[in-house]
Image (spheres, grey):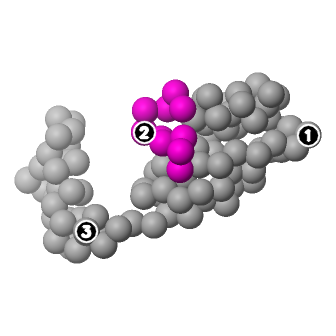
Amino acid sequence: MLQRDVLDAIKWEPHLNAAQIEVTANNGIITLKGIVDLPAKKIKAKNTAKQVPGVLEVLENIQVKISSREQKNDFDIAQAVLNTFRWNWNTLNDSIEVR
């Protein structure tokens, strides 16, 4: 029952793909296994499982594997950081330099 509840919670998370995450339950302890493409998804899966009533502890064994076509070089990362600041109206965009 608890295993199903955690799986259902993961399915409802728009950023997670339940097919990528295996869930097992044993006396309130949830174990998550699988492979995701972003570190944020790994964190989100664990946090989602923790919020399910009846979960006492979450053991996370999810691997992050980024495909080579999705890997970013330093320039791409710098641009992403700058764009994040630009999209935040509360940031002084002209005073930020990313190295």
- Residue 48 lies in quadrant: top right
Reading the image, the residue beneath label 2 is 15
Q: Nearer the viewer, residue 74 or 6?
A: 6
Residue 1 in the image, given as x and y percentages of width and height: 80, 28
N-terminal-most mark, 1 or 2: 2
Which callout, 2 or 3, points to the residue nearer the camera?
3
Residue at x 16%, y 71% (from the top left corner): 75
N-terminal-most mark, 2 or 3: 2
Reading the image, the residue beneath label 3 is 69
- The secondary element bearing badge 3 is classed as loop
Residue at x 75%, y 50% (from the top left corner): 31
Q: Amino acid at mark 2?
A: His
Asked whether disc 1 touches disc 2, contact meaning CB atoms under 8 Å apart, the reply is: no
Reading the image, the residue beneath label 1 is 27
Residue 61: in magenta span: no
Placement of 10 over or under 82, stated as above or below: above
- Quote the CA–CA distance across marks 3 and 1: 41 Å
Residue 18: in magenta span: yes
Q: Nearer the viewer, residue 77 or 19?
A: 19
View extreme (right): residue: 27
Question: What is the magenta range?
Answer: 11-20
- Residue 2 lies in quadrant: top right
Residue 81 in the image, given as x and y percentages of width and height: 23, 57
